[in-house]
Image (cartoon, rainbow, N blue to C red):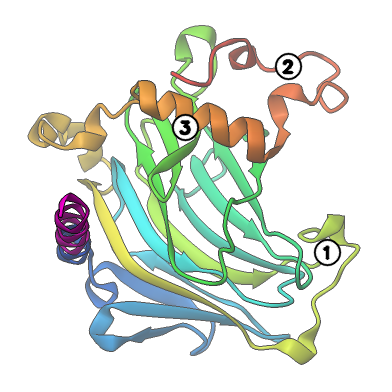
Amino acid sequence: MKTSSSSAMLKVLMLMASCLIAASAGNFYKDVDITWGDGRGKILNGGQDLTLSLDKYSGSGFQSKNEYLFGRFDVQLKLVAGNSAGSVTTFFLSSQGANHDEIDFEFLGNVSGEPYTVHTNVYSQGKGNKEQQFRLWFDPTAAFHTYSIVWNPERIIFLVDNSPIRVFSNNEGMGIPFPKNQPMRLYCSLWNADDWATQGGRVKADWTKAPFVASYRNINLDGNACSGPSCASKSLDSFNTAAWKSQALDAKGRNRLRWVQSKFMIYDYCKDFPRFPQGLSAECKRSRFL
């Protein structure tokens, strides 16, 4: 009897959770503009879904209508299935200009049966070189999964299905630039990068498999929307109840991060001594689990 009650309760909780996700999800018509691809990007189902496609002539992409200074940004994404070699599917934040800031999720395709590479990076004032790369613990082409960026004045958290995979903390006290002054838009794209994306460019795109298609849904842009000089005067005080404003990892989150990084990280700039013979960046000496 207890088992039956527990099962019923679990179903109720799952239904409530799915309703909550649907209620918080945005609408692609309202939140984004398809900016390139000559019709290869399509908004479907009344704004609930969006697909991007890539062929030998062009990829496609979209961007948020608003700029944001801090926030939480989520999207559910199903990556290109089968032979995706040469393709890159993206979900990232970026400002504009030579000294731009940027927070990257890039998904590097591969030949059939080989895993995707999840590439992350952080740019501040035009400087990056903060790459970490991961495999995933599931097939990202078989179903939708949620990818999230939390960005506040203290840290950036990369999450997959709400599991943290990376934290980049504000270490300005050590002289490390941190993106906190430039508003950024959300960008997503699917494009051809077969000169570098798969095994360093050794494996090229097979255009007989085109068009390649990536699918997005349940976009959620919960942030401090502002533009240009107005960002400096728009206080974060109005977001006192927003979880992202001060979001950090609790003990459970730190344990989950350690698990992901020990099992699924395949590249860490903080361990690449040959690439940085002059010495690793100062933040590499600090804990990444804060």
In screen coordinates, is 132 left or right of 67? right
Nearest the eye: 35 or 70: 70
Residue drawn at (59%, 63%), measured in percent from left and top? Answer: 139
Q: Is any atom of residue 195 visible in this view?
A: yes
- The one nearer the camera, 214 or 192, is 214
Q: Determine which residue is flagged by label 1.
A: 195
Q: Main SS type for the magenta part?
A: helix
Residue at image position (76%, 63%) is 114
Q: Is residue 90 above or below residue 232?
A: below
Residue behind mark 2:
280
Give yes or no for residue 212 being in the magenta stretch: no
The residue pinned by badge 3 equals: 256
Q: Quadrant of the C terminus?
A: top left
- Report the side of 132 relative to 12 (left or right): right
> Secondary structure under badge 2?
loop
Q: Quadrant of residue 273?
A: top right
Q: Position of residue 157 (x, y in %)?
A: 42, 35
x, y (%) of residue 111? Answer: 79, 70
For the residues carrying marks 1 and 3, which lies nearer the camera in this image? 3
Residue 9 versus residue 23 in the image, above or below: above
Range of residues picked out in magenta: 1-15
> If you read the primary sequence from the N terminus, does the residue marked by circle 2 or circle 3 appear first?
3
**Cα gap from disc 2 to disc 1, whole angstroms:** 28 Å
Q: Residue 121 got which mark?
A: none
Dot 1, crowdedness within 10 Å: few (<14), some or many (≥20)? some
Q: CA distance from mark 2 to mark 3?
A: 25 Å
First of labels 2, 1 by sequence position = 1
**Tag 2 near tag 1, CB within 8 Å:** no
Q: Is residue 130 visible?
A: no
